[in-house]
Amino acid sequence: MSRARIAVNVLAFQAVWLGAVGGAAAGRPWIGPVMAAVLVAAHLALAADPTKEAAGVATIGALGTLWDVLPAATGLIEYRSGVAALSGVPYWIAALWLAFATTLNVSLRWLRERPLIAALAGAVAGPACYGTAATLGALTLTEPRQALAAQAAAWSLLLPAALAIAARYDGVQAQPQERPLV
């Protein structure tokens, strides 16, 4: 995979993250989902097997959104804007999970064979993202220490699991299927 594609993948996801979080903080929660839709569409258009890749993106999007139900339901995290997609989780968070899934077979592919590093990266990056989103005003951590500890624990499991799912449904560098001889 080219360095240019990896760099574009990183920058595109960061732009979507900033658009989603900044949009939610500004009372415009639709910005992130629109940006995520463009990113996911472009990602799938470039995939060797778009159907297979779409299944992975959808599975990871659902897994992540379902995780975010727990801190919202327990009141550890309160979202400021966006119609609840599922039990207090706004649609811009669900869109962020779909956008995040586009990084797993591109810029984060290198973590696949390094599950311990992936767990550590998840334990650090997950809470950092939620903490930054809180600082920017997109959400409130009602019990910051507990909320960030819960995110660290969850992300130490979520990132390796998401990488495994992405590998299973890798449509970015899909292997050609063998054709029967007859």
Image (cartoon, rainbow, N blue to C red):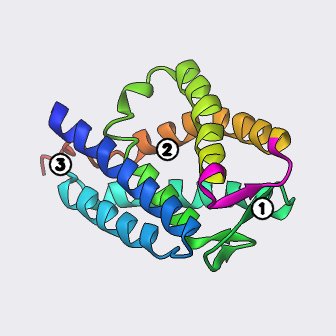
Q: Residues within 10 Å of mark 1 (few under 14, many from 20)?
A: some
- The percent position of residue 125, horizontal first and vertical second, equals 57, 34
Name the residue located 23 percent from the left edge and 61 percent from the top edge. Answer: 42
Q: Which mark is residue 180?
A: 3
- The percent position of residue 110, horizontal first and vertical second, equals 37, 26
Left or right: residue 19 compared with residue 74: left
Q: Residues within 10 Å of mark 2 (few under 14, many from 20)?
A: some
Q: Quick one: which residue is furthest to the left in this view?
A: 181
Q: Secondary structure at mark 1?
A: helix
Name the residue located 43 percent from the left edge and 72 percent from the top edge. Answer: 31
**Between residues 159 and 16, which one lies in front from this camera angle?**
16
Question: Which residue is identified by label 1?
Answer: 72
The N terminus - image quarter: top left
- The percent position of residue 45, horizontal first and vertical second, equals 20, 61
Q: Which mark is residue 165?
A: 2
- The percent position of residue 152, horizontal first and vertical second, equals 70, 35
